[in-house]
Image (cartoon, helix red, strand yellow):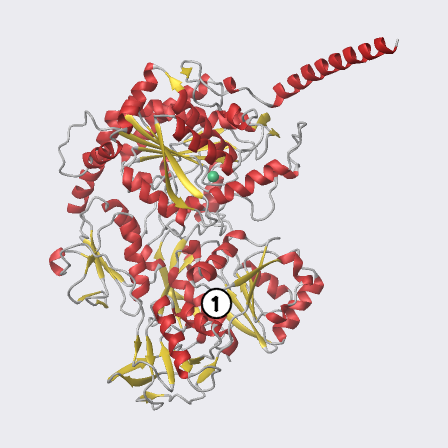
Amino acid sequence: MFCSITFFSIEMKKLTFAIFLVISLVLNALAQEPLSYFLPEDVTYNNNIPTPDEYFNQQFGEWHLTHNQVLNYIKEIARISGRAVIREYARSHENRPLVHLIFTSEQNQNKLDELKELHVNYSRPGETISSENVPLVVNLGYGVHGNESSATNSSVLTAYYLAAAQSEKIDRLLENTIILVDPCLNPDGFVRHSTWANMHQSITDVTSPDSRQFCEVWPGGRTNHYWFDLNRDWLLLVHPESRGRVAVFHEWKPNIVTDHHEMGANSTFFFQPGVPSRNNPLTPEENYRLTYEIAKYHAEFLDEIGSPYYMEEQFDDYYFGKGSSYPDVNSSVGILFEQAGFRGRIRETSNGVKTLAFGIKNQFTVSLSTLEAALNMKDELLQFQKNFYCEALELADNDDVKAYIFGDENNRQTTLKFVNLLKQHQIQVYQNEQEFTSGGKTFKPGFSFVVPKKQPQYRLIKSMFEINTEFADSTFYDVSTWTFPYAFNLPFAPVTSLRNVQISENPAEPEIPEGKVFGGQSSLGYLFRWNEYAAPEALFHLQNQGLMTKVATDEFAFIVEGKEEEFTYGAILVPAAGQEMDEEEIFGLVTSAAQQTGIDFYGLETGLATKGIHVGSGSFVSLEKPEVLMLVGGSVGSRDAGEIWHLFDQRYKIPITLADSDNLNNISLNRYNTLILPPGPYREINNAAMEKIKRWTEEGGTLIAIKSAATWAMRNDLGKAQFKKSIEPDTTLQLNYADRRMEYSMNAIAGAIFKTEMDMTHPLCYGYLQKELPVFKSGNAVAESLKTKYAEPVKFSNEPFLSGFVSEKNLDRLKNAPVVSVQPVGRGKVITYHESMAFRGTWLGTNKLFMNSVFFGKIIR
Ligand SMILES: [Zn+2]
C-alpha cells in the first residue's frame, strides 16, 4: 500500500510536470518567438556559429539584451567567423567600448586595408580607377537613442545572419561588399534602458501601457552620459562617441549608412525618403532618387513579412548633424528607420498587442533589404559617390564665394577649436599669412585661417559657414541653421577671390599652445585676461588651490618685460600679498595653471600702472570660489541641465553638485554660493523648499534661473520676469484643414541665430571685446524688458536677424528684448537667462556669458 501510494504520487508528479510543460510552452509561444520567426528560410545556416538563442540561453526578444551581452556575442562572432573582424573605435564617457564588426568574404578579409584604400581612392576627383574590383561599403548603425531597444537588439541578429547564412547570394554580397555593423551607438543610454526594462519585467504578459516598464525615470535612456542627444552630434562632435564614429565614416566612406530608431508605440514603421519639401538643398537630388529606389526594397521585404510601413509623410534630413543626414552631405546615402517603440517585452498599442520581437524582426528585415539594394545598385551607388566629389569641385568653380576667412587674435583658443572641428570633418584649413580686411573686420596673420571652398568637402563647408535666409518650407524637424562661426563667436568673412588672400602652402595643423608666465616670478602678483575660452578654468584652478583672487572692474595697463600690456574689465589679479602661501608656491601654481589651460599670465614688476587703476585699487574686487548646486530630476529639462553639467565638468573642470529637485528639504544650502535652476516648471518644489531657496538668496546666494525656471522664480517673488504675448492666429489667413499645422510652424522659432548687444563694462559681459554677440534661440518665449537700469546687460539688437527661419512678426517681438536680467533679492541676486548659453555643447561663444554669473554674480552692484 505504502509502495503503491509512492508509485501513484510519482506518476502524478510526472503527469503534473507534463501538463505544466505543455501549458508553459503554449504560454511562452504567445510571448516569445523561436529564431525561425526572425530568420529568412532561403538560406542555410552554419552550425559552427552560435545562434543568439544558444548563446544567451533565452529566446530572442524575451529579455532586453544588456550591453555586455551584445558586446560578448559580437566578440564571439569575430573570434569564430572568418567573415568578420572587430574594431574598437571609441570609448563612451562611461568607458564602454564602441565597436563595429567588419563583414566581408574571407578572401577580402585578407586584403581589407588594400580594399579600403581602393574604395576611398575610387571616388577621389581625378582618379581613373576602374570600378570593377571596388567594393561597396555599407554601414549599419543601431540605437543612437539608448531606449530604442529593438535597434541594438536586432543588430545581434544581423551579425548572426552575416556570419552564418550560406547561399550563392550571400557569397556574392560578401564578395562585393564590406559591411560595418555598429551594434550600439550609445552604450551608456542603452545600459540605462535595458536595466530599466528588465528590472520591471514580469514573466506573465503585462501589456497595459500604464506599466512602469514603459515609463523610465529621469533622465531615461535616450541620451548619453551628459544627457545629450547623440543624434544631433554628428556635425558638432562634442562627444567621444560621435568623434570616433565620424573618424570611422571618413576612413571607410560608406555608400549607404542606416540609422535604426524607434518612434511612438502606436505607429507602424517608417523609412526614408522623408518629407520632400523639407530636403536640404545642399544634398544632391540624386541622393533622394537613390533613397527612393532603396525604399522599394524595404517595401518588398516588409510586404513579405506582412508588416505595414510608410514614408515621405514625416521626418526630414535638413539638419546635417543626424545619423541619417550627415552621410547625405558626405557622398553617402543616409537612411532613417523608425520602428514603433514598445519599450518592453510586450505592450498594448492602437495596432494591437505588440512585442519587442516584432520590432526586432522589422529592424532586422530592413537591414537585409538595405543589403539587397546595395548589392543590386552597387554600380549606381559607386558612381554617385564619385560624381558627388566631382560635382563639388564644379559647384565651387561656379560659386561667387571662393573661400571663408575666420579667426580672432583675442580668442585664439576658440579659433583653434574651430580649426580642429573642421579638420575632423576632412576640411582643409590654411593659415592666413597676410592681413585681410572685409566688412570692417581685420584678420591678422598668425591668428586667422582660410578655408578654400574648392575641395571635396565643398557642400559641408558651405553648410557650416552659410547664413540661411531662404526656406522652401517653414517646418523643421530640428534647427533651421547652424552657422558655426556664430556659434563660436568668431569673426568671419567670405572671400570672393583667392588672389585677395595669401595662405600657407600646406594645410594648418595647429595645436592649442601652453600658456606662458611673462615676467617670471613676482613678489607683487600675477594678472591674466578674461577673453580666452579657458580663463574660467584657470581662475577656478587657482581658487581651488586656495589662492585669493580679484577681478578688475576697470581698465589699466602695466609694463611687463619692457612692453606695455593693456588689460580691460574682467582681468584677474592673483596678488602675492595676503595669501596663505609663499612667493615660490604661488609662482608654481600660476605656472601649472598656464600650462594646463593655455592662458598667459603676467608677473607684475611694479604695482604702478601706466594707465588706469594700480594694484592696490579698490576696483580690484575680491572673488569667492564658486560652490555650485544644480537641481536635476523631477520636472527639470534634462537636455538643458545636461548641457550645463557638461559645461562645468568637461569644458571648465569645475565641480558642480547635481541634486534632485524634490530632495531640497534634505539639503543644506549653506555650503553653496550658487544655485542653478535649469528650465522646468518645478511643480515638485514644495513651500518649505521654496522658502529655503528664498532665505538662502536673501542671505547672499546667487540664484541662476534659466528660461522657464524664471517663471517659477517670479511666481515665488524671486525677482520679476514678464514675457511678451505669443502671436495671435492670423484671422485673414484662410488655410485648409489639412494645412492647419502650417499655421503653427509659420510662427515657431525652431532654432535660429540672432544678434545681441552687450554692455561690456558689466560683470556679466566680462571677457567680451566686441559689443555684438550672436545668440542661439529656440522656442517662442521672448522676455519683456524690466525697464530697470543696469539690469539687462545683454539685449537683442534693433536689427537682430542673423541666420535661420523666423517670421517677421517674431522678429519684431525680439527687437531689444533682454537675453539676461539681474535683480537684487536681499543681499543676493537672481540672474535669469532667457536663452540657452550652452546649446548642444557647441555654442562656445555664449559659454562665458553664463560662467560670468557664476564667478562675478556676487560682485554686481
Ligand atoms: Zn531615435
Q: Indicate the quadrant where residue 435 lies.
A: bottom left
Look at the picture and state if 349 lies above or below 459.
above
SS at badge 1:
strand
Look at the picture and state if 665 lies above or below 467.
below
Residue 733 visible in the shown view = no
Q: Indicate the quadrant where residue 651 lies.
A: bottom left
Query: Which residue occupies 38% across, 25% down?
Result: 81
Asked whether mark 1 and ligand 1 are closer than 8 Å, the reply comes as no
Give percent across and percent down for residue 570. Answer: 40, 77
Give percent across and percent down for residue 745. Answer: 45, 46
Q: Indicate the quadrant where residue 323 lies.
A: top left
Q: Is residue 435 left or right of residue 222?
A: left
From this viewpoint, which residue is outermost toward the right?
Answer: 1
Q: Nearer the viewer, residue 736 or 480?
A: 480
Residue kind at label 1, given as amino acid type:
Val
Say few, some or many: other residues with alpha carbon within 10 Å of mark 1 (under 14 / 14 to 19 / 20 or more).
many
Report the residue marked by disc 1.
820
Give percent across and percent down for residue 668. Answer: 65, 67
From this viewpoint, which residue is outermost toward the left?
Answer: 499
Residue 301 visible in the shown view = yes
Q: How many marks?
A: 1
**Can you say which quadrant of the picture contains the N terminus?**
top right
Query: Which residue occupies 27% across, 27% down?
Result: 108
Q: Nearer the viewer, residue 449 or 280?
A: 449
From this viewpoint, which residue is outermost toward the front?
Answer: 3
Look at the picture and state if 430 lies above or below 609.
above
